[in-house]
Image (spheres, rainbow, N blue to C red):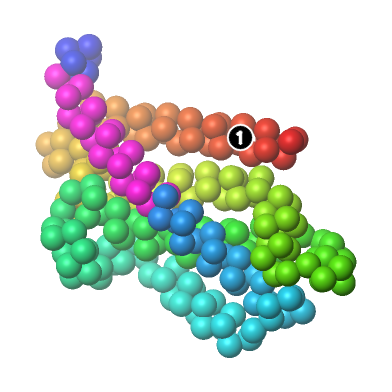
Amino acid sequence: MVEQLINLWPELNKSFLETLIMVGIGLFVALIAGLPLGLLLFVTDRDLFLENRLVKSIVGVVVNLIRSVPFIILLVFLFPFTNFLIGSTTGPVAASVALSVAAIPFYARIVESSARDIDKGVIEAAIACGASPWLIIKDIIFPEIKSGLISGLTITAISLIGYSAMAGAIGGGGIGDLAIRYGYYRYDNFVMFTTVILLIVLVQIVQYTGDYIAKTVKKN
């Protein structure tokens, strides 16, 4: 077993790094684009300071449309766009395009859900005091939901790890690719078990780290 692990080690390292690249890019894009999108969904809702039913409906429909497409189909559907953007449809960077597209609406809904827990009385009091929309978002909404944002980011990261394994099935690389190429096609149970254990450990580390940071932020 030790010898098998030593032989597998270079491939395992490469696949692990590819998974980190895919998930890292997807998570970064989700944070940059999903956060403002989620806030837009919240502040344009009924009885809020930027209420706009048209914007809310359009953004909501787009978000729901993307979320309703199974990831493996979304991955294939985005091949032309990925090829245009990256110049290739294989490899971890190419797979991160579809991962990012899937992660943006996913995280946006989590942000919106976190913001809904805010006591609307606090926001109404700020409006009554003449606070601008930007000040309300910066000084009231963000401090109230920052713990929820981190928890949401943790959930998104774990979902992306699962998606990245699917991306490996069609040339995305990563741990999923290693499991399919060596574990499934070659009937190598050792590789299959090792990759599954590696994914479980990775998810546990992400969950524990995310929970710890969220609790620390909440206390502060």
Q: Which residues are magenta?
A: 7-27
Instruction: Report x, y in % for residue 171.
Output: 17, 51
Instruction: Report x, y in % for residue 81.
Output: 22, 69
The residue at the point 77 percent across, 79 percent down is 47
Q: Quadrant of the C terminus?
A: top right
The residue at the point 51 percent across, 83 percent down is 58
The residue at the point 60 percent across, 72 percent down is 41
Residue 10 covered by magenta stretch: yes
Confirm whether residue 169 shows in the render. Answer: no
Q: Is residue 175 above or below residue 12?
A: below
Q: Which residue is mark 1?
A: 213
Q: Is residue 59 above or below residue 117?
A: below
- Mostly what secondary structure, the magenta segment? helix
The one of 106 and 53 positioned closer to us in this rendering = 53
* Mark 1: amino acid: Ile
Confirm whether residue 15 shows in the render. Answer: yes
Using residue 211 as the reference point, say whether residue 117 is left or right of it: right
Q: Quadrant of the N terminus?
A: top left
Q: Is residue 19 above or below residue 83?
A: above
Using residue 66 as the reference point, say whether residue 166 is left or right of it: left
The residue at the point 83 percent across, 65 percent down is 126
Using residue 31 as the reference point, say whether residue 139 is left or right of it: right
